[in-house]
Image (cartoon, rainbow, N blue to C red):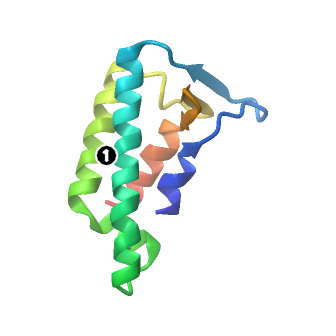
């Protein structure tokens, strides 16, 4: 689950990265849906960790519904915004930052 949280954070372009600042309500809505899916998956993983002996990665990947929801919201967002998942790119709005390339890598670990 740590991999998903690495995709969420504060915007920082000090390492030569690119920040895409969102202001369009439709774009914010799409990025927000991805953030909501990550939060729901993290909540499910936290419950899993408290109630099972699974590893954090096993718990993060065990919520098939959560992974499917995240994959769906991710796919929709990047289909409409192909620049979002580029390497070293952070999507930022209202104090929230997402790294879509990190989300893609994290989703790949659950296959």
Is 15 located above or below residue 2 in the figure?
above
Left or right of 11: which side holds 64? left
In depth, the one of 90 and 83 nearer the eye is 90
| Label 1: element kind | helix
The C terminus sits in image quarter: bottom left
Q: Quadrant of residue 65?
A: bottom left
Give me the residue at 37% from left, 67% from top: 45
Residue found at the very far bottom of the displayed protein? 53
The percent coordinates of residue 7 (x first, y second) are 53, 46
The residue depicted at 48 percent of the width and 22 percent of the height is: 83
Tell me if residue 98 can be seen.
yes
- Vertical order, 59 against 37 (above or below): below
Measured as percent of width and height from the top left, residue 6 is found at 57, 51
Q: Is residue 81 left or right of residue 66?
A: right
Q: Is residue 69 above or below residue 28?
A: below
Q: Residue at left 39%, top 19%? A: 27
């Amino acid at each position: 689950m740590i991999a998903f949280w690495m995709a969420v954070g504060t915007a920082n372009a000090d390492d030569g990265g690119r920040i895409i600042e969102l202001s369009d309500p439709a774009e914010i809505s799409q990025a927000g849906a991805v953030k909501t899916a990550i939060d729901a998956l993290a909540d499910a993983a936290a419950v899993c960790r408290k109630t099972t002996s699974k590893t954090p990665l096993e718990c993060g990947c065990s919520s098939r519904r959560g992974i499917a929801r995240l994959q769906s919201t991710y796919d929709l967002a990047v289909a409409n915004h192909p620049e979002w998942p580029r390497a070293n790119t952070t999507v930022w709005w209202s104090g929230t930052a997402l790294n879509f390339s990190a989300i893609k890598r994290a989703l790949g670990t659950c296959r």
